Structure formats: C-alpha cells, structure tokens
Amino acid sequence: MNGSLSCPRKVVNMQFIETIAAMIQRGLIYVDETLDIETRVEIELIKTLISVCTKNVYFEIKRARLIRRLVKIKEEQSLVTEAANLIMEVAMETFVSMQNPEKKRSTSFSNKSIGST
C-alpha cells in the first residue's frame, strides 16, 4: 500500500519540476527578446529566474547559463568585480556538465577572474 501512495507523489513532483522548467525556458526567451530594451529590465528578469533556479539541482545548468548572461552584462557595464563575484557562485561541477562551447566561455572567464583577485 505504501508503494502505491508514493508513486503519485513522484508524478506530482515531476509535473511541478516540468512546469518550473517550462516557466524558466519561457523566461529565457524573454531575456533574449529584451536585448534591445532597457538593460535594467533584462537584469531584473535574469535575477528573478536565477532565484527560481537556486537550490534546485534540476535547474543548476539553467542557473549557470543565466549567471553567465548576467556576467556578460556586468562586464559590458565595466563592473568586473561584480561579474567575478557572480561567476564564483557557480560550482565548477556545473561547468563540467555544460556543453563544450559554453564550458569554454565560462571557465575562461572564471580563470581570468580568479587570477585577477
């Protein structure tokens, strides 16, 4: 009887995770669309999506991508210290699980920021 009760809970959890993943994906589309709009709006949207992804292992790569995007904005604004602090929040293991082009961009910045501190 206990086995049958836990199965619906797992289904509900997966549905919840899939719903959150879809919301994050939609948010990423909005981030891409806001490139020409005011940067402040883009930053707030990225920070909101990062907060949704935080402390959830299923969204760690999406969080790393969002942080990488925010780091790029901070670099363009010449806020290198803030950018370095952001990139250091992401676990190196997350970079390892990212695809190669993403990994190269993120780890190269991480290495530069560590070397400059």
Image (cartoon, rainbow, N blue to C red):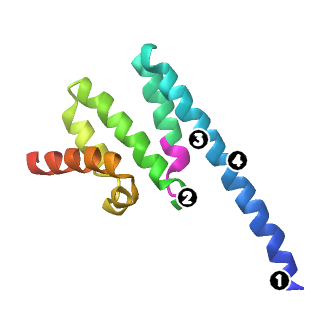
Q: Which residue is mark 1?
A: 3
Given residues 48 and 70, the one toward you in this image is 70
Given residues 104 and 30, the one toward you in this image is 104
Taking the spot 46% from the left edge, 36% from the top edge, the residue there is 47
Disc 1 to disc 2: CB gap under 8 Å: no
Q: Is residue 51 magenta?
A: yes
Distance from the alpha carbon under mark 2 to that under mark 3: 12 Å
- Which quadrant of the figure has residue 68? top left
Q: Position of residue 109 (x, y in %)?
A: 21, 44
Q: Which residues are magenta?
A: 50-56
Secondary structure found at label 4: helix
Please, is residue 44 above or below residue 63 in the view? above
Q: Residue furthest left?
A: 116
Label 4 is placed on what type of residue? Answer: Thr
Q: Position of residue 6 (x, y in %)?
A: 80, 76
Q: Which residue is mark 2?
A: 58
Label 2 is placed on what type of residue? Answer: Tyr
Of pointers 1 and 4, the one earlier in the residue sequence: 1
Given residues 29 and 3, the one toward you in this image is 29
Question: In the image, is 76 to the left or to the right of 50?
Answer: left
Label 1 is placed on what type of residue? Answer: Gly
Of pointers 1 and 2, the one earlier in the residue sequence: 1
Q: Which residue is mark 3?
A: 24
